[in-house]
Image: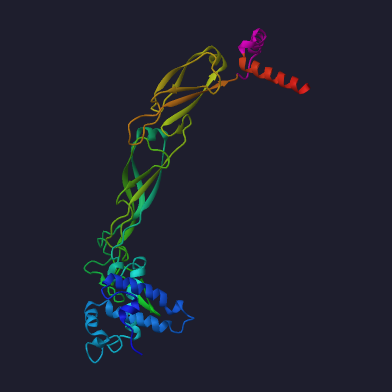
Amino acid sequence: MAKRDYYEVLGVSKGADADEIKKAYRRKAKELHPDRNKDNPDSEAQFKEANEAYEVLKDADKKAAYDRFGHAAFEGGMGGGPRGGPGFGGQGDFASAFSDVFDDLFGEFMGGRGGGGRQRASRGSDLRYNLRISLEDAFQGLQKTINVPTAVSCGTCNGSGSEAGTEPQTCPTCSGMGKVRAQQGFFTVERTCPTCSGLGEIIKNPCNTCGGAGRVQKDRSLSVNIPAGVETGTRIRLAGEGEAGMRGGPNGDLYIFIEVADHPLFQRDGQHLYCRVPVSMTTAALGGDIEVPTIDGGRSRVKVPAGSQSGKQMRLRQKGMPMLRGAGVGDMYLELAVETPVNLSSRQKELLREFEEVSKTDTNPESSSFFSAVKNFWDSMKS
């Protein structure tokens, strides 16, 4: 049976470039693969035919010869060919040709071709440090020294992992590539080298201090600048202050997560502060001055209007928290809590009864309005 034209097999024109030929072969390889066509007894032959065509057309020299002489270019000793050439048509070149497409399809996921997967020096891990500070510290900002347990570069071998005077050697299993390939049917699967764990090197004489890791565990003291205005959840990144990399690789980063402790006097909402201030019944009724604290440690005098009720809010401008890395300061809000007197003496009780007797409706307008509404409700229910 006469062999079909290679361009016809792949479904491309004679003027197709290398990229078009590869894309056409990828489509054919997926379409004709025997694993996807188990009910078609001709699928394997068709798949090999497509593979044969691609093996010729992907090579510029073979393609030029084919364009000039056709199939005769690879017959009768004209340079070997798809069927008669050394190795081609057998399992080795067949899998090799298909692995080109496999690499193209999955190469990025598997770590790329060739030596792209080698990682002789790997980056160190990032570290997290939780730092709890007071609200006053968050208001002022502070410089704080922290101790971070981490892996640091080994001083004995300078991070190489090898004993002094020796060098890491190229891994004999992967030849320094960090990955090995295994043939599985039509596919070539690439895996991390089990001997060197993807580093591409092995250490014959490991450093006695670090055991070949190139790093050792140690506590580090770091001075950290906490800016004013931080709040719970603020994250501070210290580049290069994380774990040392393996065998001289770059350090990871250190992330400091801030938690601001609750305060006995102030509650925070963003840049604003809230403070609940108890006032006596007489001060709320008659009015007067009270002294309240501020977050900076100072004091502010506030005038309580006569007739103030519980829940009344008053604002002190720019007495709140500074904005993080920005201009401006929040406000502080005071919420009055009118306190009912307790533990009264006989005389105090007597005076309150006298006050109750001389009180008029307009003295307690809110309660008078409420009980008037209650009376109307009951009357309507009776009718």
Coloring applied to the structure: rainbow
Q: Using the image as rendered, state which of residue 125 and residue 162 is in the foreground.
A: 125
Q: Residue at x 28, y 80 (%)?
A: 56
**Residue situated furthest right in the rendering:** 382
Position of the N terminus by quadrant: bottom left
Position of the C terminus by quadrant: top right
Tell whether 367 sits left or right of 5. Answer: right
User: Residue 174 appears at what percent x and percent y?
Assistant: 30, 74
Prevailing SS of the magenta stretch: helix
Q: Is residue 202 visible?
A: no
* Residues shaded magenta: 341-363
Tell whether 189 sits left or right of 86. Answer: right
Number of numbered discs visible in the structure rendering: 0
Magenta run includes residue 342: yes
Q: Residue at x 24, y 82 (%)?
A: 66
Q: From what the image shows, is residue 7 above or below residue 312?
A: below
Q: Quadrant of residue 13?
A: bottom left
User: Residue 166 appears at what percent x and percent y?
Assistant: 23, 69
